Amino acid sequence: MKLLKKVALAAGAVALVAPSMALAQDGGAAAAAGASIGKGLAVVGAGLAVLGGGLGIGAVGKGALESIARQPEASGTIGTNMILAAALIEGATLFAIVVAFLA
């Protein structure tokens, strides 16, 4: 959890500093700097999406394994639901990555 807080803090710092860096440039260079900063923020956004998706799928897997350990006779149903939930999380993560790179 500490790593997630550090990543969020770093992303916030970049978001705060990026506009001032772009304004410090002169005319044409400011547009080029803004474009490269935008691409950098898109990469940070995509990385955060992957991090969130990984944490989500990990939480689903952990919950499923704990449930199967407590009630082994329901392992088929729990496993099916776990795979469905993981697929939905992965789809949302992929959508977030595509949106981050298109922005």
Image (cartoon, helix red, strand yellow):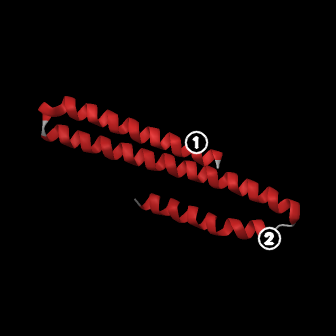
> Residue at position x 40%, y 59% from top?
1
Q: What percent of the width, then of the height, locates residue 40?
A: 67, 53
Relative to 94, does residue 36 appear above or below in the rendering? Answer: below
Q: Residue furthest top?
A: 76
Residue positioned 55% across, 44% down in the render? 97
Residue type at mark 2? Answer: Ala
- Write down the quadrant of residue 41 in the picture: bottom right
| Residue nearest the observer in this picture, 47 or 98 | 98
Question: What is the quadrant of residue 62 in the picture?
Answer: top left
Q: In the picture shown, does residue 49 fall above or below 28?
A: above
Up/down of 34 relative to 92, above or below: below
Q: Percent position (x, y) of residue 38?
A: 69, 55
- Name which residue lies at 46% across and 42% down: 92
For badge 1, the amino acid type reads: Val
Q: Residue at image x 57%, y 65%?
A: 12
> Disc 1 and disc 2: Cα gap in Å?
30 Å
Q: Which residue is mark 2?
A: 24
Q: Which residue is mark 1?
A: 98
Residue 2: % across, % down: 42, 61
With 29 as the anchor, is 60 left or right in this view? left
Q: Judge left or right: residue 96 versus residue 17.
A: left
Q: Earlier in the sequence, mark 1 or mark 2?
A: 2
Tag 1 and tag 2, C-beta contact below 8 Å: no
Q: Residues within 10 Å of mark 2 (few under 14, many from 20)?
A: few
Of circles 1 and 2, which is in front? 1
